[in-house]
Image (cartoon, rainbow, N blue to C red):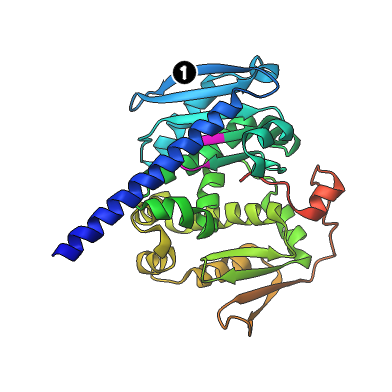
Amino acid sequence: MESIVEKSKIIKISSIVIITIIIILLSYLIFVALRLNVKYSHFNSTISSSSIPLSVFIDDRISETINISIINDSIQENEIFHQIYYNKPITLIICLNDNESEIIFPLFKTVASGFAFSDNLVIINYQNTSNLGYTLKSIIKHELSHTLIKQNIKSFKSMMLDFSKKSLWFSEGIALYNQDHVIYQFDELKELLQDYSIEYYPESDNFHVKPQNYRLDYSLYYHFFYYLVEKYGKDKMINYMELMILDYKNGLNLYSDLFNTKIEAELNSFLIYRLGKNKQKWLTTASTGQRLLSRFLLRNNRANPLRGAGLPVKQMLDGRAIAR
């Protein structure tokens, strides 16, 4: 009994230390945001469904071009779609460009248009959002979708670690589906994938295109999630989200139990029946004994992989222009 009590004390102390560190980190980020080379307009509001505080900081150079109501609208629409509610204060910072976002968070010098840190801080890069062809509201909805799910995940460890590593097809897919904006429509995605393979990783319950191209990954997540909604209905996918919230690290088994099929089988069906007119060759790589490799061998004429991208060639080749 004493060992159980001691273990419980250790867990409580560890949790307090971790929470304290996070609070200090977030306070630092907000402090730095207010000390940037430019001024930020600060708006205080509350989330209407719960009266939870919402703090918004917008670069003064773009503040007049942004209607603050799109943030509140995004929050309400997210709660309706996900059928869960925000339960912690949220800070949202809208920077002008990479130079500003890097000052707030050194690792955020990317061509991404947004990032959800922890479960209560979102940073949006305004110029990247428009350069990548997104609307500001679609990116705000996307990142706040991540925040909403994170705030409801029961395990602190899963919220901090598993959410960003496991089942990205789900976390990004549901956010992309909800924002209702994708870079590559289905027919264009089908053409672009001719020279790419798709690898599935059971250990992280996720798949990626090879060679690496994040824009193709994210478009795949959107269309795959859309396919599952068409197949099972939105309510069933929300049921899966609710199970993930309870046990996020166990998404692979949760999916099999709920849908009576493995995610690999769903992915295979999606590639064959939705992409159409293609031959599939499935292999198991010797390196892991589990990894599935799908090689597209389309009979169609070879398409220009940069067609219709609307981006500089270098960004397309790097495959780094994404909304995270």
- Which residue is painted at 63% across and 30% down in the image? 136
Residue 209 vertical placement versus 291 (above, below): above
Residue 164 placement, left or right of 155: right
Q: Where is residue 200 drawn, in percent x and y?
A: 59, 70
Looking at this view, is 218 or 31 the one in front? Answer: 31
Q: In the rendered view, tell whether residue 22 sits above or below residue 217.
A: above
Relative to 11, is 180 on the left or the right?
right
Which residue corresponds to the image point at 36% horizontal and 37% vertical from the top-left?
85
The one of 270 and 70 positioned closer to us in this rendering: 70
Which quarter of the figure is the N terminus placed in?
Answer: bottom left
Residue furthest to the left in view is: 1
Residue ID at (69%, 30%): 100
State the image quarter where residue 237 is shown. bottom left
Q: Tell me: residue 72, above or below residue 152.
A: above
Residue beneath disc 1: 44
Taking 4 as reference, is 295 left or right?
right
Q: Quick check: is 234 in the magenta stretch?
A: no
- Give the magenta part as a residue range: 117-122
Q: Residue drawn at (73%, 46%), measured in percent from left and top?
A: 321
Q: Position of residue 294 (x, y in %)?
A: 66, 73
- Which amino acid does the dot numbered 1 rest on? Asn
Q: Is residue 2 left or right of residue 118?
A: left
Q: Position of residue 60 (x, y in %)?
A: 66, 16
Q: Toward the viewer: 275 or 244?
A: 244
Q: Is residue 88 above or below residue 118?
A: above
**Residue 118 visible, this orientation:** yes
Q: Secondary structure at mark 1?
A: strand
Residue nearest the viewer, comparing 30 with 113: 30
